[in-house]
Image (cartoon, rainbow, N blue to C red):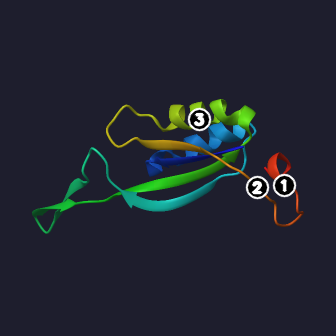
Amino acid sequence: MHMIEAVIKPSALDAVKDKLSKLGIYGCTALECKGFGKQKGHTERYRGGRMDVGFVPKIMLKIAVKSEDLDKAVDAVVGSARSGNVGDGKLFVYGLDKTIRIRTGESDNDAL
């Protein structure tokens, strides 16, 4: 089992969710967050003046997947979130040692 953690633009959320659903991957947690990378934030106008805003609104997705679904899930997120512009986001993958569905007590792949 693996955990995919992806930081994407808010505008890409629906496309990523739809693509994952078509693959049969239904469990996903989305968190609103702020961050910056190479784009170093952005500039906004306030009362006629320019202000540097250091953090850009993003969505962090946490998706637990079976090992056999990992590659297609990663491809789905990257393909749906990529616009080719700076600020598209990042994706991280790491292993899961244990997963338990609290309601039923099912564990590991059965809990996903």
Q: In which quadrant of the rendered view does residue 107 lie?
A: bottom right
At a point 53% along the width and 61% down the height, the residue shown is 31
At a point 31% along the width and 48% down the height, the residue shown is 37
Say what secondary structure mark 1 lies in.
loop
Between 77 and 1, the one lying in front of the other is: 1
Say what secondary structure mark 2 lies in.
loop
In whole angstroms, how far apart are the C-alphas of marks 2 and 1? 5 Å
Residue 74's disc is: 3
Q: Amino acid at mark 1?
A: Ser
Kindly indicate whether the residue at mark 1 contacts the one at mark 2 (C-beta within 8 angstroms): yes
Say what secondary structure mark 3 lies in.
helix
* Coordinates of residue 23 in the picture (x, y in percent): 72, 35
Residue 100 to residue 6: above or below: below
* Coordinates of residue 112 in the picture (x, y in percent): 78, 49
* Coordinates of residue 16 in the picture (x, y in percent): 57, 41
Give the crowd class for mark 3: few <14, some 14-19, many >=20 residues within 10 Å.
many
Which tag, 2 or 3, sits closer to the chain's start?
3
Judging by the rendered image, the residue that carries numbered circle 1 is 107
Q: How many marks?
A: 3
Q: In which quadrant of the rendered view does residue 44 lie?
A: bottom left
At a point 26% along the width and 45% down the height, the residue shown is 39
In whole angstroms, how far apart are the C-alphas of marks 1 and 3? 23 Å
- Give the residue furthest to the front: 97
- Give the residue furthest to the left: 49
Which tag, 2 or 1, sits closer to the chain's start?
2
Q: Amino acid at mark 3?
A: Val
Between 94 and 22, the one lying in front of the other is: 94
Judging by the rendered image, the residue that carries numbered circle 2 is 99
Between 73 and 100, the one lying in front of the other is: 100
Which tag, 1 or 3, sits closer to the chain's start?
3
